[in-house]
Image (spheres, rainbow, N blue to C red):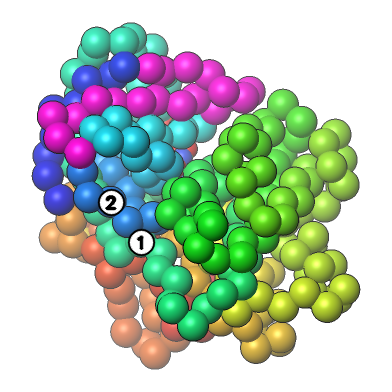
Amino acid sequence: MKDYVATIVENKEIACGICSITFELPEAPAVRCGQFGDISVGGTHLLRRPIAICKVDGNKVTYCYQVKGEGTQELKAMGVGTQLNVLMPLGNGFFVEETERKVALVGGGVGIFPLISVLREYAGKKEISAFIGFRNKGAVCGLEEFEKADTFVGVTDDGSYGEKMNSVQVFAAALEKGYRPDVVLSCGPLPMLRALKQLVEEKGIPCFVSLEERMGCGIGACLVCVCNLTSGAHARVCKDGPVFNCKEVEL
Ligand SMILES: Cc1cc2nc3c(=O)[nH]c(=O)nc-3n(C[C@H](O)[C@H](O)[C@H](O)COP(=O)(O)OP(=O)(O)OC[C@H]3O[C@@H](n4cnc5c(N)ncnc54)[C@H](O)[C@@H]3O)c2cc1C
Ligand code: FES
């Protein structure tokens, strides 16, 4: 992990309220899929914003972010050539075992972006099926990446693109038709992860989820991001996660 001085080479809106920002770093970083960066947004904001690393191409790193509060609004306003501090790569990331051949990606909302990094790492090496939920047609993005999966099903909450379903419902429908992955990798809003946890536990399918928590330091020192494990112990989402075995974490 390094604190890079990163130069913005592209910052553009890719869907309604969702932007993609690409930084050039002084070197090519070694990144696992599912890791994240902590991006300084300047101004009066002391806390950096944790964002999943979406794509790495040599020394260029792309993050996709939803414009939400002040920090991401400031990020959106930043032009090409602006330099920011980006601490990365952080967290453990996703890992697929040698023995796991069929991988299901189940993602919703901004949780789809770390799953793009999984696709980029494992496409062609594993049989990947992506079940991806968007809010509506205007929020649809990343199709050029998801279409690299062996199977891709995109749905929306309102049915304006694909069927009117969420990603867990469309994944459950595939299971009903006989599809059975060796492992599920997921990221998305908490209610979605809770529904997925219940489903995979019923079906006995291994599943790993990437969690979002408010963060302070991003490197395991401040304990702002602590979550509860089913064992009764606690874990730091930034350092011990953000990826956890679904059965070991309380959602
Ligand atoms: C590991 C990780 C990966 C993430 N990856 C992405 C991603 O790929 N794309 C994306 O759009 N968003 C992602 N998020 C959520 C993103 O960090 C927040 O949307 C962002 O920090 C909001 O900042 P803001 O200043 O616009 O909002 P504000 O609400 O003004 O933020 C105020 C404070 O709360 C924190 N905060 C607000 N919402 C969240 C949240 N959901 N999770 C964590 N901290 C939050 C901010 O970092 C800031 O410190 C991720 C979060 C985590 C923990
Ligand atoms: S954010 Fe400080 S320990 Fe996780």
Image coordinates for residue 43, horizontal then vertical, percent: 22, 19
Q: What residue type is labelled 1?
A: Gly
Residue 51 seen by the camera: no
Mark 2 CB near ligand 1 (8 Å cut) = no
In the depicted structure, whether residue 248 falls above or below residue 192 = below
Disc 2 packing (10 Å; few <14; some 14–19; many ≥20):
some
The mark found on residue 157 in the picture is none
Residue 173 lies left or right of residue 223; in this view the side is: right
Disc 1 packing (10 Å; few <14; some 14–19; many ≥20):
many
Residue 226 position by quadrant: bottom left
Ligand 1 shows up in the quarter that is: top left
Residue hosting label 1 = 93
Image coordinates for residue 190, horizontal then vertical, percent: 57, 60
For discs 2 and 1, the disc positioned in front in the rendered view: 2
Residue range highlighted in magenta: 10-28
Residue hosting label 2 = 31
171 inside magenta stretch = no
| Front position in the image: 44 or 177 | 177
- Mark 2 touches mark 1? (CB < 8 Å): yes
Q: Look at the magenta stretch and give its main secondary structure.
A: strand
Ranked by sequence position, the earlier of labels 2 and 1 is 2
In the depicted structure, whether residue 238 falls above or below residue 7 = below
Badge 2 element: loop
